[in-house]
Amino acid sequence: MSSRASIAILVFATIIASVFAQTATLGYTPGIILWENPNFEGQNGETGGTTGCFGIKHSIAFRSYKITPSTTVRFYSDLDCRGQLVGESSSDKADVTFMSPPLSIRLDHSNAPAPQPKSLKAVAILSGNSTVKGSVTFTQVTVDEPTSIAVNLTGLKPGLHGFHIHVYGDLSNGCASFGLHWNPFNVTHGDIKDDSRHEGDLGNLLAEADGTIKTTFTDTHVKLFGHLSVVGRGIIIHADQDDLGRGNFTDSKTVGHSGARLACGIIGLAAP
């Protein structure tokens, strides 16, 4: 091998070592080095030849998957034993041709998750064929945080009232077209405190002597982010107390025997 070829290969190796040294300073471990096209060819055309050439026919790709948790970084350097590279390049006496510059870095974000907003807020304005009206406001700060639910209702009979998120946000037939409880995992109706329950089971709300409900609570099942988001679904306040699935009525295990649908609203994404 000529001295120029030796120097060129040494420089290439030094660059690669330097890049991986820099990735280590970021606190991530570089991934496995892979040869994408290990099709070595000597000057005389022999596959795997060892005479006069230490390049590869098409390309070598060094991949590190740990530059950041969601970013793939690929390092490319094309070598050709026969000088067939397109573009600016330089050759040594051994006909080992290097791209100029010898190393290119490409970032691949194709597998990175879509960026999520820092906070989401939704609101439902409730009304129906009764005196009940008001609003329910949902706030989720991040995808991993519980959702805050602020309820402000008037016109209720004093006492406990079942409160649920339903599958549909469809007012074509009033509250009757909201469907059953939001239950994506097909489990039995329960209390808001139960581990296994409808995602839309929010228990009972207490109306004061003046018929108002003004309360705020949090829930880990209700989501504004992701494919389980309740945005676009419906919310209903019922006439009676929810038996939380503990009763002996035929509808205890499905809707908690919580009575008529007094008021309902579509959960819509709130303006920022």
Image: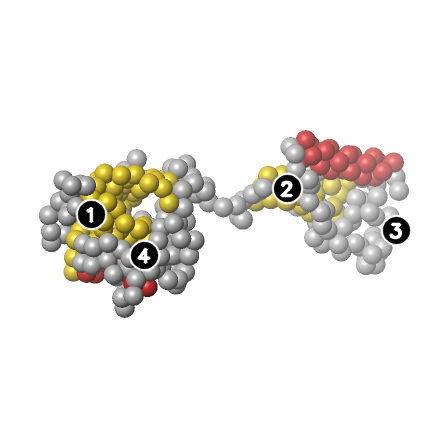
Which residue sits at x=75%, y=54%? 38
The quarter of the image holding the C terminus is top left
Q: Amino acid at mark 4?
A: Leu
Give how far apart the Cα atoms at labels 2 and 4 are: 48 Å
| Circle nearer the N terminus (1, 3) | 3
Q: Position of residue 259 (x, y in %)?
A: 20, 59
The quarter of the image holding the N terminus is top right
Q: Which residue is mark 3?
A: 51
Q: Amino acid at mark 3?
A: Thr
Q: Looking at this view, is 249 or 6 the one in front?
A: 249
Q: Position of residue 158 (x, y in %)?
A: 17, 46
Whether residue 165 sits left or right of residue 128 in the image: it is right
Q: Amino acid at mark 1?
A: Gly
| Circle nearer the N terminus (2, 4) | 2
| Circle nearer the N terminus (1, 4) | 1
Please tell me whether mark 1 sits on a helix, a strand or a loop: strand
Q: Residues within 10 Å of mark 4 (few under 14, many from 20)?
A: many
Q: Are marks 3 and 4 in contact (CB under 8 Å)?
A: no
Which residue sits at x=14%, y=40%? 210
Give how far apart the Cα atoms at labels 1 and 2 are: 57 Å
Please tell me whether mark 2 sits on a helix, a strand or a loop: strand
Instruction: Please indicate, yes or no, whether residue 265 appears anywhere in the rendered image.
Output: no
Q: Which residue is mark 4?
A: 244
Q: Are marks 1 and 3 in contact (CB under 8 Å)?
A: no
| Res. 159 mark | 1
Please tell me whether mark 3 sits on a helix, a strand or a loop: loop
Relative to 80, residue 17 above or below: above
Q: Looking at this view, is 135 or 120 the one in front?
A: 135
Please tell me whether mark 4 sits on a helix, a strand or a loop: loop
